Each structure stands twice: as structure tokens, then as C-alpha cells.
Image: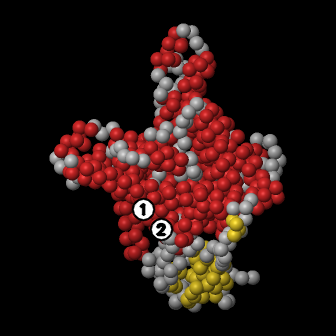
Amino acid sequence: MSWSVLRNRYSITFGSIAILATIWNVYVALNDDGIITGTVVGPDNRPVAGATVVLSEKTLLVTAPRARTTSDANGQFRFNGHKLYHIYLEASKEDIGLMKAKEFRLYFKGQNMALEKPLRLEATQ
Amino acid sequence: MHKYPHWPIHLVLVFVSALMLVPFIWVFKTSLTGENIFSYPPSILPKDPHFFYYVDVWYTIPFFRYLVNSVIVSAIVVVANIILNAMAGYSLTREFVGKKAIIVLYLSCMMIPFQVTIIPAYLITKELGLLNTHLGMALPVCSTIVCIFVFKASFDAIPKSLIDAARIDGMPDWKIVFRLMLPLSKSAIATNVILAFIWSWNNFLWPLVIIRDQNMQTLPLGLSRFLTVVEDTTGALYAFCIMVLLPGLIIFLLSQKEFIAGLTKGAAKG
Amino acid sequence: MQLIKKKRTRELLLIWFFIAPSLAIFTLYRIVPLLWNGVLSLQFWSPYKLPEFAKLYHYEEMLFYDDAFWQALWNTIILMASAPIGIALALFIAVLVDTQVRGRNIYRTIVFMSYPVMTVAVGIIWQWLYNEKVGLINYVLISLGIIDRGIPFLESFDLALPCVIVASIWQVIGFYMIILLSGLQNIPPSLYESAAIDGATAWMRFQRITLPLLKPSIFLCFVIGIINSFTNFDLVYVMTQGGPGHATDLLITYIYTVAFKLSKFDYAAAMTIVNFLFFLGLALLANKAAGGEAGAIDVGK
């Protein structure tokens, strides 16, 4: 095989596209367990235990809730195995307050996500 | 022509190029930000661009399946074109009874645009049982007259001495075509591949006519259907446009010279 | 003797075998459909029962009772008549690109880029550029102070067709330019030089040398313009679907609607025959005017 085939502009273009596609697919396969982790804090920025967190899916037409969980003693919560790419997260606790639905968009279905900023409950009047 | 200052020419050309590019740039910008669908006045620089519309397109519609369908049909068309056109081109370089009639037939076929044939072609494809299939989509365009003449011209240019030498060596004729003449006609092959690919990739009317099954749709069909579903409510439509434009653009940019040479040669009828 | 005969037969067999597949495709998908269209147009066709002979019923219906047909025909003619505008613009650009400016290949590429892209995407982009509320064109017009509020370009009966024509010219101008460029490059520069020595101005050089020598290319562009107006289905379908009313319907989009949305294959076949005859007549006329074969290219777009 002559090496000049490799320097052909077609080989370079399509070869790079193929390589990029492979790298992307490998990355996706490694990171698509569908885990979302985060913390819920109250208006005073202290972690809230037992808050309900609802995970909803947004398609082009509707927004529908898919899963819910409660935060543990440290105010942390975790979702497992979701297969969504466009989600809303909503948190609430009865006497403390609620956080309106916040939108997140992912790059691929089930992308693992660890929230940087905690979900902050605002006191309801 | 050689003593004129160049800058006015540049100015006009830049203006013209800008006009030609504006649609592309605009759709690219909107696919990144989605802001010009709802907000007004439109702005030039994108405000917080993001790639999420592309994610939407990928998951909301079976983009990958449409892509695969388009690729399969284009592959069939390109391969069939090369083989059929080369064979026909070779036959046209030899003398035989009825050659004139065939050439007249081909020339008159050039005057029958594809759009005139869609109704009976639909009925024929139905009789052959090829509705909703890749082969059905590919079949009517498996050969183009322009490319036949391109091959003929290319084969004519091969020196007879080479062919005679091969004949004396006892090579059967078909081997001469595929082993000797074809490799010497690289530019004709390139022209054929590029033209056949671009025409088949962008072909909209014929798949629209014969494909009813959603899973068999090609990219242009998918785009048109997406348009009717979402109208202009989302930037995903424009992301879809970009994703659909890119392969054609890439192929064109990679093969400009052959593309343009092929078109001008074909336009001048070989 | 025996051997030679056999060889010639073998050779003939091979030649016919080689030409057979492509011949089959063209017979099956060009010749037969054309003839079948003719037959269909003279029948009452239905998917459920056998066709009956209809004589000239469809032609009568089409020519005397169908306003939409005449509107579509008129629109097609207008689109065709706008081809010279595109050709003139392309000629202007081609002449500029042909001068020895630096980067002329880049300009050539940019102008030509609009041709190999998918017409469906082009239709969507232009449809949005013309949008009444958020379109770029309305925005430019408003900020230049020419109008106060956005014009609904693609919904107005008068403006829709010119808008489609502009989009069509945008797409095809690159193709015209390429053809004219190759024609320009075939003109030997010595002609210009000797004319310049003889004292001819640039305009005179253009008129007396360039234009006459470009006649074949220009007529070729015109033939392509004719072909385009009779076959430009994608752009119109995506931009307006032939609306509003039938203001932007071309013959080909109307045929498609009648055939595949209303399932009236027989009537559509009659219109196809008329479409084809019209196109053939015009193309042959253009050829004659060009003084011979300007070449008809198989635009399989």
C-alpha cells in the first residue's frame, strides 16, 4: 500500500471524521449511565434533608415528569439510569420552599451530570 | 484588461460574495442560538451559542436513519453509474450496426427531463414492486447521458496502439475495458462519481413520490417533513439544515476542480 | 474465415451486452414513461378498475376549464423570462472574476457554493429570510427606513413569485457563472491585445469581442434557464407549496399536486404532455437561435 493514499485530501477528511466519530462514541459509551447528582439547599444556603426532587423530560411538545427522589440527610440527591437529554429539575420541601423548574440540556442521552450549583429553595410567601 | 486598478474589482466581488454567503452565515448563526426566530431585531453576533439544537435534531427525528438511507441510495447510484456509463461509453467507441440510432436515442433522452416521467415511473416502480425501497429510489438515475459521453470522450483519447497491443497479447475485450481503459480514465470516473453523488444526494422529488414509509426516507424528505411538523418554532430546524448542507459542501469543497470540469464538459456535451 | 466471423460476432455480442443495461434504464425510465404519459392522458385512469378511452376530455378540461393550469403556465413563463437577469448578473461576476485579481478562485468558489447544496435547505433558509416578522430582509428594509412594518413577502399574491425567482437566481447564478467563465477563458487574450493596440476602449472590446464569442455559452445558460423553470420543483414546494392560491405554482408543482395529492393520474399526465411539448418547443427554439447545438445538459437536480 502506498503511503500517498494517506495524504490524499479525501482520506484526510473522511479519516478525521471517522476518527472523531469513534472518539465521540467511546466517550458517550463511557458516560451515559444516566446519573445526576446534586445538593438541595434552603434559602439560608444550608442543606435541606428530605426535599423532593422531580426530574422531568421535555420533548418538542410536552414536559412530563419521569422520576422523583428525596434528598438525604446531607441534602444530596441522586438519580440513576435516566435516558433523557433535555430535562427539568424541580425541588421542593413543604415548610421551607420550592425551587421553580430549572432547565438543563445534555449533549447525549443519559449523560452523567453532577450539578455544580446546588438547587436552592426559595421561601414561598 | 491588465492596466486597471484592482481594488474596485475586489470591492464589488467582496460585496457579491457577501450577498451569496449571507444565507449560509445566517442559518448557521441561528442554528447556534435560535434567537432570530422569536427575538427582534436580529443581531449579528451570536448571544450564548450552544450546540443543543443539534442534539435535538439527532434525537427528535431519526436523523441517523435518514442519513444511512441517503448514503445507501447514493452509493448504489454512484457505483451503478460508473459501471453502466463506462460500459455504454465503451460500446459507443466501437462501430456497429444501429450505433447511429442509439446515439439519436440517447440525445433525445437528454431532452426528456426527469420531472416529465414521474407519473409513469411511479407506476412502473410499483409494478416492479420497488416502492419504498432503496433500489427503487436509485434505479431511474442509475445512468446519465452526460456521463456516458464523458466516458466515451475519455476512451477515445486512449491511444489505439495500447489497445491493439493488448489485443495482440490475447486479452479478451471485457478485460481490456476494465483493466486497461478504466484505470486510464481516472478523471472521467471522478467526474462521474461527483456528479452522480451530488445529484442523488440532493434528489428530492423522486423519493417524495415513491417513499411512503417513514423509515425509508432520505435526508431531503426528512427535512421537509420536519419543516411541516415544527414550522419555525425551533432552532432545531436550522440545525437540521446545516447538518444536511454539510456533506454536500464538504464533497464540493474537496473536489471543486473535478466538479466544475465535469459540469462544463457535460454542458458542452462532451 | 470461420474464426473471423465468430470473432466479429463475439465482439458484437460484447458491445450490445455492454450497452444494454444503460439502454434499458433509459428506455424504461425515459422513453416508456413519455409514451405512457401520452396514453394516460387519453384515458380515464383509476387504480381500481381498467382504464377507459377518454379521447381529448382531459385536454379540454385543462385548456378551457382549469384556471390553475393557466396560472401555473404563466408562472413558469415568468420564471423562464427572468433567466436573462440571472445570466446578465452572472456575466458581470464572471467578467470580474476572469480578471487577474488575487484570490479569484476563492470568489469563484463562494459564488458557486450555492449550487451543490440541497435545494430543500435553500428553500427553508430563504423562506425564513423572507419572514414577515423576523426575516432578515424585512429587518434591513425597516432599518433603512424604506418601509415601516414587515411585508409578508411569501403570502402576498403579487410578491410571492418574484421572491421565489430571487431565491432561484441566487441558487443558479453560480452555475451560469461557471459556464460563462469557461467560455471567457476560451477567448484568446491576443484578440484583446490587438484590439487595444488598435485603440479600442474596454467597452468596445467587450461589445465586439467578448459578447459575440460568448454567444454559445450565453445560449447554453439560457437553455439551462428554460430547463430550470420547467423542473424547479424542490424550491417552490418547500418555500410556498405553490401558494398563496396558485400564485407561485409552477407547472411541475401543480402536476405533482394533481397527481399525487389528488390521485388524478390521467389529468396530470395530460398536463405533463403539455409541459413537455412546451419545454421541447422552447428548447429547440433556443437551439435554433443559437445556430446549432448549444448543448442540452441532463440536469438531474
Q: Is residue A115 left or right of residue C10?
A: right
Check if mark 2 and mark 1 are on a common chain: yes
| Quadrant of residue B115 within the rendered picture | bottom right
Visual colour scheme: secondary structure
Decide which of tag 2 and tag 1 comes sooner along the chain.
Answer: 1
Q: Report the residue marked by disc 1.
A: B76
What residue is at 29 percent from the left and 46 percent from the top?
Answer: B181
What residue is at 64 percent from the left and 55 percent from the top?
Answer: C233
Q: Is residue B34 left or right of residue C180?
A: right
Q: Which mark is residue B134?
A: 2
- Residue B70 image point, x, y percent: 48, 63
Label 2 is found on which chain of the structure? Answer: B
C47 is higher (above) or lower (below) than C104: below
What residue is at 28 percent from the left and 37 percent from the top?
Answer: B159
Crowd tier of the residue under label 2, counting other residues whose Cα lies within 10 Å: few below 14, some 14–19, many 20 or above: many
Query: How far is mark 2 from mark 1, CA to CA?
Result: 8 Å
In front of the other: B145 or A45: B145
| Contact flag, marks 2 and 1 (Cβ < 8 Å) | yes
Label 1 is found on which chain of the structure? Answer: B
- Residue B228 image point, x, y percent: 66, 67
Amino acid type of the residue that numbered disc 1 sits on in the rendered structure: Ile
